[in-house]
Amino acid sequence: MTTAAADTSVQLGRIRVLKEAIITNQLPKPGPVVYWMFRDQRLRDNWALIHAVDQANKRNVPVAVAFNLFDRFLGAKARQLGFMLRGLQQLHLDFQQTLHIPFFLFQGEAIDTIPSFLEECGASLLVTDFSPLRQVRGWKEEIVKRVSDSVSIHEVDAHNVVPTWVASDKLEYGARTIRRKINNWLPAYLIEFPKLMPQSRKWGNPNQIIDWETLIENVLREGAEVPEIEWCKSGENAALETLMGTKGFLTIGLKNYSTDRNNPLKPKGLSGLSPYLHFGQISAQRCAIEAHKLRKVNPQAVGTFLEELIVRRELSDNFCYYQPHYDSLQGAWDWAQKTLMDHALDAREHLYTREQLEKAQTADLLWNASQLEMVHNGKMHGFMRMYWAKKILEWTTSPQEALEIAVYLNDKYHLDGRDPNGYVGCMWSICGIHDQGWRERPVFGKIRYMNYAGCKRKFDVDGYIAYVKRLVGDIKKRKGETLLNSKAKQLTSIQQLPVKKLT
Ligand SMILES: Cc1cc2nc3c(=O)[nH]c(=O)nc-3n(C[C@H](O)[C@H](O)[C@H](O)COP(=O)(O)OP(=O)(O)OC[C@H]3O[C@@H](n4cnc5c(N)ncnc54)[C@H](O)[C@@H]3O)c2cc1C
């Protein structure tokens, strides 16, 4: 694998050549460029798209975007799939209307659909964005094997400010070890995006008809167990609004970020960007550029935000990329595995099953509140996520079981779940990755401990429990009303049906 692909406005370090086409004299003129979009579902500020258009212009061929809809990837339900499809529906329109680039949607396995589309359109280059997750890497390896030798494949890290493979070539121990490396690269990579070049050749018919309404209806029905949430509107415009609109994070929330972000009673103290970052509806680089512009006014808040947005987030990609066991006990450092095993048989004050935890049936009202916030609102406050996962370690029969349950619940209910940040968050809480050893105690061993009393010292625990109760009550009430309204509508439409005369 090489890291170069000349003639592009994208930094070469951001691009990796996964496959170099074999050029033969028999080949007629080159075929189109296809961008297989997976993780970076946006039109603006997208290095993979910029590269695809650059390459198409260089070859004087058209470019198309292809998206493969998997069957419930990593257990996604209505909440995640509805959000994603609504964003893609807007994106499809934007591609067609503003760029005249066709957007093809395939359903099934990408290892089948992408190679057959490349063959069908006679493509010469496949551009794809980057994800460190094992499934995605596995598909790419397979696609490299399946596509014809006349097709090149370029992978572009359009998700991280500093590309994962540039930031570090190894598994980093923690924020302390990767921070300096990332900071050294920021002058080169934290730059304004170039303007997307107009296409020199256009696709014959850029208008693809996709029945989004039926697709959305289907995923909402099939994944109804975890319904959509209302507070987070999908799409690139909504993402930008959340970042820098009149009520956006940089306009309102940033100034108190350093103090409010650890207070679960102040959900607006956080940016609320994680769903948009997860689905790539906004670029982390855009968020960083805009935040950076405010550094003179709010130096501390901007510094803290950039630490989370760049260092911590990109450390998660580093972990998932270089640690094949990123979601199992095997992925923990030796000291952590040893200490957890030393305490595996310690007596637990409570033991709960996955079902009891999922239903928030524990003796700890604070934990139950955080679980309900996640189940009903789709986003648990960042501070509570740590407490939540650590308690699962305390209340289950083994660290491996704790990790499995935490990942299962996190991925099932969080709108931003199924993300490297989620695997690392669970691994940090339960297996001490990116952390250090602490004073030894039962069950946790040397893994950092958190308890109810500590939370009480930090924030108004009863206030948070009452806040979640109100929140969940309101959500259930609105759902009940929506259900009643749709039943009433059904009834009216039945009553309005023409009555067939009995003969
Ligand atoms: C057990 C556990 C599970 C988690 N699961 C997820 C998950 O599924 N998806 C997810 O995106 N994050 C997860 N996190 C990390 C973090 O809690 C969330 O990113 C954050 O709460 C999202 O809210 P926000 O965007 O409003 O945060 P903000 O504080 O406004 O942060 C801005 C962005 O910085 C990044 N960030 C913030 N905190 C962290 C962190 N600790 N590690 C890595 N990046 C961070 C995120 O991309 C976030 O969107 C988890 C953490 C823990 C402890």
Image (tube, helix red, strand yellow):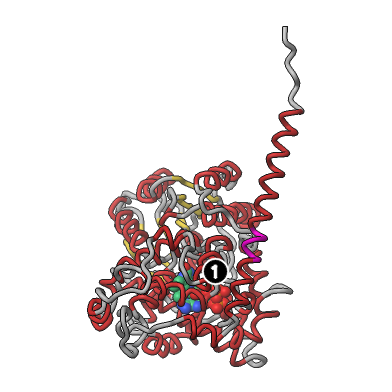
Residue at horizontal 51 percent and vertical 75 percent from the top: 384
Secondary structure of the residue carrying tag 1 is helix
Left or right, 453 with reference to 447: right
Left or right, 23 with reference to 379: left
Give percent across and percent down for residue 473.
65, 61
Quarter of the image with the C terminus in it: top right
Residue 487 visible in image: yes
What residue type is disc 1 on?
A: Ala
Disc 1: CA contacts within 10 A as few (<14), some (14-19) or many (>=20): many
Give percent across and percent down for residue 276.
56, 66
Identify the residue under disc 1.
369
Residue at horizontal 30 percent and vertical 53 percent from the top: 149
Q: Identify which residue, 60 or 226, lies in the foreground.
A: 226
Q: Identify which residue, 111 or 201, lies in the foreground.
A: 111
Q: With respect to residue 337, does 408 lie above or below?
A: above
Residue 59 visible in image: no
Q: How many marks?
A: 1
The prevailing secondary structure element of the residues shown in magenta is: helix
Quarter of the image with the N terminus in it: bottom left
The magenta stretch spans which residues?
A: 470-475
Give percent across and percent down for residue 131.
40, 66
Is 286 one of the magenta-colored residues?
Answer: no
Residue at horizontal 64 percent and vertical 83 percent from the top: 254
Q: With respect to residue 166, does 48 lie above or below?
A: above
Give percent across and percent down for residue 16.
37, 69
Q: Residue 235 is drawn in which quadrant? A: bottom right
Label 1 C-beta lies within 8 Å of the nearest ligand 1 atom: no
